[in-house]
Image (cartoon, grey):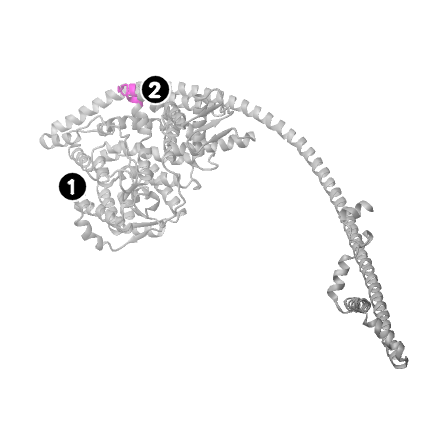
């Protein structure tokens, strides 16, 4: 029971993811769709709205317990950063922080905005489970594991995508019988949109969960798609309409991405051989056209095509592919024939294909793809430059699904072959900008999954062909009616007859026993149909009641949603009014601010002008003082020079006077006077004093005169010693402003 709860919880998460994606919330990237899941887990884990955690493992465990989703720590860390950014931006504070060591703290948070969406997811999943249980009762099948099988089947494609995108493995493989039951349930309820849409949402959510393991890159490559036989058959609308739509969508999407399309000449020959065979047996293929919706016979009935029409398509096949679809046909495949014949793949495939030629065709395709890849083992999907594109299952072979996967799948590298629905889903996931409706992608994917599962359990083409031949052979003899044939086809299609080959063996041994067996199975089917019709009537009556309840719930949910929208609109209106008031005040404050800024600017300009004027006057004042100072110094120097000149002249005159007087005295004086003077001069004290005075006076006057007139350094030193009045000294700017 625990596993049921886990799968059911995961289905709820898938449903929520689908609704979120449908609302176009992928603003910053694929991880945005997981934000509501994480927010809900935070609300449940920390109801107080404030928390400090030592490790984000606490949150990942809570998510796993609540939704059965395993979110890797690096991915969860990025999601928490997205939540923190939005929360902090909204509050204008740092209310949430994620630290490098994995710890975190949240100051305040209320994440109730997704509670209605999660509740809707629970109700949707519950309705699907309820309808599936009722369906199982109608088919007399029921066990405690039914619900698990249902959800395993729906998310089966996720495992396939993970295999390509993240080198995963299909660990969710269910038993084929269980798969058939679930596939029949989904197929039945395709006609009930109210239920099918819920199944489709779960399927879509499972695909979206691939983003947990895979983050799209911007790698662009020149990719070649080599198209297989069954792909071309679908493209020609010789398969189911859904299959044709899927193949056409892939072509459209791939062209937008710049992909190239190629077809082997061998593939064209194989298709022509197939169409010619179907044309030759069209009228006799009664069973085949009724039990296999993917068969060319069924498409011929749907499109009202005759054998002539099939032959015309076959004859013009190459022109259709090259002109209508613009495919390139590889004309010469001989170089790959030899390699393929001696390959390991060919030796395995030929054991299961009905002809060696068909096995060789598949081996050639694989060899071609590998050579286009440079014979390299490529691990990343984005780096693959060539794919062999297949469409569903091939009923012309006895190769089981398991053996096919064992042959082509590898955990260490990307396989050469890929199904069209897988490739389309991957391209959609890898390129969110591609204009493809997500519901269309999901519908095509789950339809392909259902078709693949139902057809995989059908008898092989050769067995059905043999049964058709036997019925045609003994129809008239033993009066096997159209109703008998239809009832037999129904039982085979519903997997109620498992040993079809045994019926063919009975035809070889005993014709009458064969005819009786056909009629016996027809009667059984009539009895089952009578009971089944009653049960299915009850089922659909209940379904109608469930649909009515669903619609009523949807109306209630819509009312709640509308009420909430109304409240939000009112709040939004109030916010707008407040914003208008705030804008007016902001405009007023802005204009007032601009006016103040302008006034401030004017004042500043005036102040600058005044300051410039004052500085100019200050400079003029200091210049004037400098001039006055220089004049003062020059006047002092001139006075000093005049004094030195006067002193020098006086001393010179005295010396001349003494010299002239002495000469006159010695010439005109008598001897007694000369002797008296000589005695005085010979008196040493007097002569020393007189000599010293004369020398001193002469030295002083001459030196003084020389320094003032012929020694610039002396004048400079004298200028430094001068005491300059304060009125001539430079004045500081601040002192000047204060004085003025």
Image: 282 above or below 122: below
In the picture of the structure, the residue carrying the numbered disc 2 is 539
Where is residue 77, by image quadrant?
top left
Between residue 343 and residue 150, name the one nearer to us.
Answer: 343
Image: 669 above or below 504: below
Where is residue 543, by image quadrant?
top left
* Residue 648 place in picture, x, y as percent: 83, 69
Image: 702 above or below 337: below
Between residue 55 and residue 192, name the one nearer to us.
Answer: 55
Between residue 345 and residue 276, name the one nearer to us.
Answer: 345
Q: Secondary structure at mark 2?
A: helix
Left or right, 538 with respect to 82, comes to left
Residue range corresponding to the magenta coloring: 133-147
* Residue 572 place in picture, x, y as percent: 59, 28
Mark 1 neighbour class, 10 Å CA radius: few under 14, some 14 to 19, many 20 or more: some
Task: Give the CA separation, mark 1 to mark 2.
Answer: 45 Å
Label of residue 206 in the image: none
Q: Secondary structure at mark 1?
A: loop
Where is residue 190, by image quadrant?
top left
Residue 477 visible to an observer of this rendering: no
Whether residue 172 is in magenta: the answer is no
Image: 343 above or below 658: above
For image coordinates 39% across by 34% down, the residue present is 74
Between residue 600 and residue 179, name the one nearer to us.
Answer: 600
Which numbered mark, 1 or 2, is in the foreground of this view?
A: 1
In the picture of the structure, the residue carrying the numbered disc 1 is 351
Locate the N terminus by quadrant.
Answer: top left
Mark 2 neighbour class, 10 Å CA radius: few under 14, some 14 to 19, many 20 or more: some
Left or right, 298 with respect to 218, comes to left
């Amino acid at each position: 029971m625990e596993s049921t709860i886990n799968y059911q919880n995961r289905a709820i998460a898938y449903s929520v993811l689908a609704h979120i994606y449908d609302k176009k919330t992928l603003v910053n990237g694929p991880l945005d769709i997981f934000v509501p899941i994480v927010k809900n887990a935070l609300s449940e884990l920390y109801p107080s709205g404030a928390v400090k955690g030592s490790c984000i493992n606490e949150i990942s465990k809570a998510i796993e317990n609540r939704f059965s989703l395993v979110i890797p720590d690096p991915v969860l860390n990025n999601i928490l950063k997205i939540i923190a950014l939005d929360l902090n931006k909204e509050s204008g504070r740092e209310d949430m922080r994620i630290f490098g060591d994995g710890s975190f703290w949240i100051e305040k948070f209320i994440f109730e905005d997704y509670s209605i969406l999660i509740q809707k997811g629970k109700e949707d999943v519950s309705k699907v489970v309820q309808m599936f249980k009722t369906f199982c009762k109608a088919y007399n099948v029921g066990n405690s594991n039914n619900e698990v099988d249902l959800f395993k089947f729906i998310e089966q494609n996720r495992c396939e995508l993970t295999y390509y995108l993240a080198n995963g493995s299909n660990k969710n493989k269910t038993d084929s019988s269980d798969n058939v039951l679930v596939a029949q349930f989904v197929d039945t309820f395709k006609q009930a949109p109210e239920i099918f849409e819920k199944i489709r949402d779960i399927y879509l959510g499972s695909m979206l969960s691939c983003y947990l393991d895979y983050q799209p890159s911007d790698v662009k490559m020149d990719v070649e798609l080599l198209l297989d036989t069954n792909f071309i058959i679908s493209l020609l609308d010789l398969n189911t309409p859904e299959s044709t739509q899927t193949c056409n969508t892939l072509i459209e999407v791939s062209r937008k991405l710049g992909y190239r399309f190629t077809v082997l000449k061998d593939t064209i020959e194989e298709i022509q051989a197939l169409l010619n065979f179907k044309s030759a047996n069209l009228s006799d293929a009664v069973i085949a056209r009724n039990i296999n919706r993917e068969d060319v016979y069924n498409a011929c009935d749907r499109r009202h095509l005759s054998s002539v029409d099939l032959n015309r398509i076959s004859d013009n096949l190459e022109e259709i592919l090259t002109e209508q679809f613009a495919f390139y046909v590889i004309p010469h495949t001989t170089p790959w024939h030899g390699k393929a014949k001696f390959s390991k793949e060919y030796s395995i495939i030929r054991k299961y294909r009905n002809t060696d030629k068909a096995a060789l065709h598949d081996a050639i395709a694989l060899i071609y793809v590998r050579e286009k890849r440079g014979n390299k083992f490529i691990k990343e999907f984005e780096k693959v430059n060539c794919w062999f594109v297949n469409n569903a299952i091939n009923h012309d072979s006895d190769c089981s699904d398991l053996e096919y996967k064992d042959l082509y799948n590898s955990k260490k590298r990307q396989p050469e072959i890929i199904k069209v629905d897988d490739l389309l889903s991957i391209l959609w996931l890898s390129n969110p900008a591609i204009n493809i409706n997500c519901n269309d992608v999901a519908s095509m994917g789950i339809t392909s999954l259902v078709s693949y599962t139902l057809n995989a359990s059908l008898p092989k083409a050769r067995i059905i062909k043999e049964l058709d031949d036997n019925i045609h052979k003994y129809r008239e003899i033993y009066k096997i009616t159209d109703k008998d044939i239809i009832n037999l086809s129904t039982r085979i299609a519903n997997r109620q007859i498992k040993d079809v080959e045994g019926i063919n063996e009975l035809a070889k041994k005993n014709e009458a026993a064969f005819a009786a067996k056909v009629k016996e199975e027809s009667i059984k089917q009539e009895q089952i149909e009578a009971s089944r019709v009653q049960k299915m009537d009850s089922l659909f009556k209940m379904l109608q009641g469930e649909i009515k309840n669903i619609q009523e719930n949807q109306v209630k949910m819509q009312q709640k949603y509308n009420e909430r929208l109304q409240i939000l609109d009112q709040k939004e209106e109030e916010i707008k009014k407040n914003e208008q008031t705030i804008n007016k005040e902001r405009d007023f404050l802005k204009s007032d601010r601009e006016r103040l800024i302008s006034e401030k600017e004017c004042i500043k300009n005036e102040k600058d002008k005044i300051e410039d004027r004052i500085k100019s006057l200050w400079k003029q004042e200091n210049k004037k003082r400098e001039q006055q100072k220089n004049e003062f110094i020059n006047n002092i120097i001139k006075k000093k020079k005049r004094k030195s000149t006067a002193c020098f002249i006086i001393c010179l005159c005295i010396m001349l006077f003494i010299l002239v007087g002495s000469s006159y005295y010695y010439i005109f004086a008598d001897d007694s006077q000369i002797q008296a003077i000589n005695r005085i001069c010979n008196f040493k004290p007097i002569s020393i004093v007189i000599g010293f005075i004369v020398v001193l006076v002469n030295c002083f006057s001459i030196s003084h005169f020389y320094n003032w007139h012929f020694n610039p350094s002396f004048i400079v030193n004298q200028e430094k010693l001068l005491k300059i009045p304060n009125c001539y000294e430079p004045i500081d700017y601040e002192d000047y402003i204060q004085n003025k």
